[in-house]
Image (spheres, grey):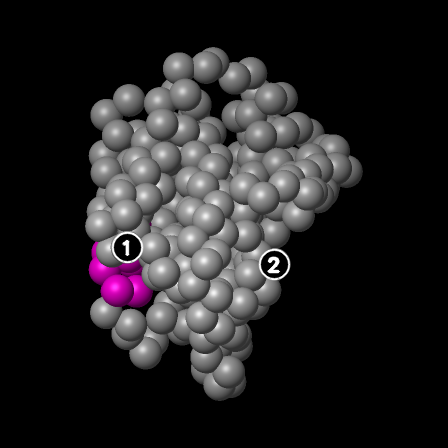
Amino acid sequence: MGPALLVSLGAFLSAFAGGWMALRAVRYVGLIIAVGAGIRIGAAFFDLIPESVVYLGSLATAMVWTAIGFLGFYAVDKLTTLHVGHETATELDHDLANHQHIGIAGAVGMGIHSFLDGIALAAGLAVGGGTAVVIAVVVIVHRFSDGIGVVSFLLAGHVPLRTAYRWLTLVAIAPVAGVLLGTIVQIPDDGLGALLAFFAGFFLYVGAAELLPEAHRRDRSRWIVFATVGGAVAIYAFSVGVGAVGASSP
């Protein structure tokens, strides 16, 4: 429980740092989001999926669970109002001042997927070793991007600054709740493998369908591509360094 709470605290502080940066309108926000997208996509391909195969004993089964994670989160994202897409963010940027509720809905959606990140982190800690370290890094880095995202949604929706900080606090706390739930529930090896593959799909969806469009919307330069590839390469090198790549059977 101690390491989980320590990493959760790191994720909490990272979200606040991202929100602070968004409030200062730093010009490199798009590049930061792109790096975060590359890290999340790379972690899914290079660490979560291979590790899930070790626990499930089958690549085919692992890919089924990855598809369920990707398509499941896509369906929830698009069929509900809990998460607002980047098209809505663009509309908000065009001074639709009467759409504060859209910005708040976006914050709620980010809170939900922050909670899921906490559960993914708990699963990684249950695996232990390099995978736990990789997932911890991914969650902390992505919380920085989410801090940027939630404040951008709220301010674009003309939500008062004090309200924006309150929502940022809730989004920052959500992974802690996810970690607490994930560490209380004991998961068998097969279930752990399925959970890792499911969150690989979740990571791929968030990175490719949410973060990358947002990065390109904010910065249309070729550096976004380099930042994305760099993030993926960096997490691969990190995974190799901590021994998460090429794991042995549990």
| Near-viewer residue (205 or 123) | 205
Highlighted magenta segment, given as a residue range: 15-23
Can see residue 7? Answer: no
For label 2, the crowd category at 10 Å Cα-Cα, with few meaning under 14, some 14 to 19 and many 20 or more, is some
* Residue 193 location (% of width, % of height): 60, 29
Instruction: Please tell me whether residue 182 belongs to the stretch shown in magenta.
Output: no
For label 1, the crowd category at 10 Å Cα-Cα, with few meaning under 14, some 14 to 19 and many 20 or more, is few
Q: Is residue 41 above or below residue 31?
A: above
Circle 1 is placed at which residue position? 160
Instruction: Please tell me whether residue 19 belongs to the stretch shown in magenta.
Output: yes
Q: Amino acid at mark 2?
A: Ala
* Residue 229 location (% of width, % of height): 51, 70
Q: Is residue 133 above or below residue 27?
A: above
- Residue at left offset 56%, top offset 35%: 196
* Main SS of residues in magenta: helix
Gap between marks 1 and 2, in whole Å? 28 Å
Q: Quadrant of residue 56?
A: top right
Left or right of residue 250, residue 23 in this image:
left
Q: Quadrant of residue 50?
A: top right
Circle 2 is placed at which residue position? 209
Q: Which quarter shows the N terminus?
A: top left
Q: Residue furthest front?
A: 98
Secondary structure of residue under mark 2:
helix
Q: Residue furthest right?
A: 60
Q: Quadrant of residue 76?
A: top right
Q: Amino acid at mark 1?
A: Pro
